[in-house]
Amino acid sequence: ASYSVNKAFFSIGLPQTGKIDIEIYDVHGKLLWNYTSTRTHPGKYSVKWNPGNTINSGIWFIKLMTETKNLVKKVILLK
């Protein structure tokens, strides 16, 4: 994931046809945002998250789920 002024972009490589789910949680486990794709063909995709000023500096967890893989990454945001 990459972050710029009030926007985050998630680059995803999907090796086979399937669905992509992205969830963002705060450090307390509260779901803040989610994205679910329709059935998607293999390839590279970019998903934009535009939180505006709704998030503060802190620790966030980004969960990426496909039909074959789940991945969680910790992100530290400093403004």
Image (cartoon, helix red, strand yellow):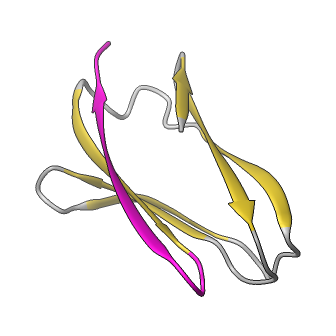
Residue 13 image offset from top left, x and y in percent = 72, 58
Q: Give left or right: position of 8 versus 23.
A: right
The quadrant in which residue 42 appears is: bottom right
Compared to residue 5, the image places residue 42 above or below, namely below
Q: Give left or right: position of 60 versus 54.
A: left
The quadrant in which residue 5 appears is: top right
Q: Residue at x 81, y 54 (%)?
A: 44
Q: Residue at x 55, y 30 (%)?
A: 2
Compared to residue 19, the image places residue 32 above or below, namely above
Residue 11 image offset from top left, x and y in percent = 67, 46
Q: Which residues are magenta?
A: 66-79
Looking at this view, name the residue that lies furthest to the front.
Answer: 15
Residue 53 image offset from top left, x and y in percent = 41, 26
Compared to residue 53, the image places residue 67 above or below, namely below
Viewer-side residue, 58 vs 74? 74
Compared to residue 3, the image places residue 16 above or below, namely below
Q: Give left or right: position of 63 versus 18.
A: left
Viewer-side residue, 53 vs 20? 20
**For residue 70: magenta?**
yes
- Quarter of the picture containing the C terminus is top left
